[in-house]
């Protein structure tokens, strides 16, 4: 099978894409007892605005008002063979002066040899990575870091905790990772299986959102909505075209499309979306998927059109 070197370790025999596991899984502790104690200004996020996994943490930081407690810097969305880089013009690393994100990984584990990914939660205290798994970082931001938040909203209240974990899990493989399984498949069968799983789950979510404003009752977004949003908002501009998730456009869904607009218009969501960076990243960073590097024009989508979902609970 013809597999690019960068993907060799994540391609199975049958041509399906199997994502690497995250290497750094430490947590910030709410008191002074742990290795990484909660302190304002101590932790830093390295992210890319184009990346749906990093985007989870960017939204949580904005929604909760954690901007002064957790600093942030952005890598250039267009990656060359040497990985994520700080190339200037808004893509700088004021904390360590790194030129490439790889330096953060090497400093934390000199033997690290997997793909260097965003997001990264960095500890200024020890000068190491605390965690590079977006699910963990998102959870930490709205739980452990909540005492430092200007808007300490609950994104996984105890009464919903189990249901949130279950729905997160149910959405991850077919949807969040599913678009990548479609786009990075190296066989027709693996691609079609990914597309089938993806649209089956989107259909179920569309039905769930017919009578409920967000994924859970209560009339406001929860953690799972953030995790779904970052995939849906990229769908028609990128996944539908670049990753061949072509059965249907997101904007053709009766409920998912207004739901996506509703979230986009919710404080902390839309203002964190950069379609230019998203499109530049995907179309120009996967030469095996798009060898010309031509960036598809932005589809005509009005994210600011009224969602009309306020009366749902
Ligand atoms: N499981 C990780 C996945 C993160 C991830 O794969 N990020 C992508 C960007 S969308 C990345 O950094 N890729 C680097 C590469 O492919 O070399 C998480 O959720 O944090």
Image: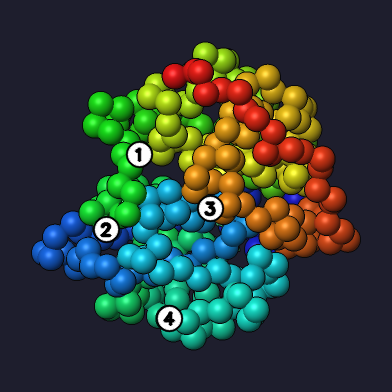
Q: Is residue 155 above or below residue 113?
A: above
Ligand 1 image position (quadrant)? bottom right
Label 1 CB, ligand 1: below 8 Å?
no
Name the residue carrying label 2: 148
Q: Is residue 109 left or right of residue 101?
A: left
Label whose residue precedes the other's in the sequence (1 or 3): 3
- The quadrant the C terminus occupies is top left
Tell me the residue at 75%/51% (across/down): 1
Q: Which mark is residue 100?
A: none
The residue carrying pointer 3 sits among few (fewer than 14), some (14 to 19) or many (20 or more) residues within 10 Å by Cα, namely many
Query: Which one is in front in this view, the residue at disc 2 or the one at disc 1?
Result: 2
Q: Secondary structure at mark 1?
A: loop
Label whose residue precedes the other's in the sequence (2 or 3): 3
The reply to whether residue 307 is in sight is: yes
Are the residues at dot 2 and dot 4 in contact (C-beta closer than 8 Å)? no
The residue carrying pointer 1 sits among few (fewer than 14), some (14 to 19) or many (20 or more) residues within 10 Å by Cα, namely many
- Kindly report the distance in space between the C-alpha atoms of the residues bearing marks 1 and 3: 16 Å
Name the residue carrying label 1: 155
Residue 150 placement (x, y as % from top left): 32, 54
Name the residue carrying label 3: 55
In terms of depth relative to the viewer, which is nearer, 244 or 93?
A: 93
Residue 98 placement (x, y as % from top left): 51, 83
Name the residue carrying label 4: 95
Are the residues at dot 2 and dot 1 in contact (C-beta closer than 8 Å)? no
Label whose residue precedes the other's in the sequence (4 or 1): 4
Label whose residue precedes the other's in the sequence (3 or 4): 3
Residue 171 placement (x, y as % from top left): 51, 32
Label whose residue precedes the other's in the sequence (2 or 1): 2
Are the residues at dot 2 and dot 3 in contact (C-beta closer than 8 Å)? no
């Amino acid at each position: 099978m013809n597999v690019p070197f960068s993907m060799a370790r994540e391609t199975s025999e049958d041509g399906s894409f199997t994502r690497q596991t995250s290497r750094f899984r430490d947590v910030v502790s709410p008191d002074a007892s742990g290795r990484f104690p909660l302190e304002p200004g101590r932790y830093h996020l390295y992210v890319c605005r184009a990346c749906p996994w990093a985007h989870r943490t960017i939204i949580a930081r904005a929604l909760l008002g954690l901007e002064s407690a957790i600093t942030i810097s952005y890598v250039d969305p267009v990656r060359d063979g040497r990985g994520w880089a700080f190339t200037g013009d808004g893509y700088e690393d004021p904390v360590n002066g790194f030129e490439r994100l790889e330096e953060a990984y090497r400093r934390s584990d000199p033997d690290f040899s997997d793909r260097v990914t965003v997001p990264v939660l960095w500890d200024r205290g020890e000068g190491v990575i605390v965690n590079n798994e977006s699910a963990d970082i998102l959870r930490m931001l709205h739980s452990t870091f909540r005492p430092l938040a200007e808007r300490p909203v609950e994104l996984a209240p105890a009464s919903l905790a189990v249901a949130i974990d279950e729905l997160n899990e149910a959405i991850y493989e077919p949807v969040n990772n599913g678009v990548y399984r479609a786009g990075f498949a190296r066989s027709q069968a693996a691609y079609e299986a990914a597309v089938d799983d993806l649209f089956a789950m989107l259909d179920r979510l569309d039905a769930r959102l017919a009578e409920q404003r967000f994924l859970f009752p209560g009339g406001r977004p929860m953690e799972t909505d953030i995790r779904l949003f970052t995939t849906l908002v990229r769908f028609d501009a990128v996944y539908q075209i670049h990753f061949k998730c072509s059965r249907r456009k997101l904007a053709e869904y009766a409920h998912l499309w207004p739901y996506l607009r509703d979230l986009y218009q919710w404080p902390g969501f839309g203002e964190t979306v950069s379609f230019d960076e998203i499109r530049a990243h995907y179309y120009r960073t996967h030469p095996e998927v798009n060898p010309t590097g031509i960036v598809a024009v932005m589809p005509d989508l009005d994210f600011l059109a009224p969602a009309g979902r306020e009366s749902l609970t």
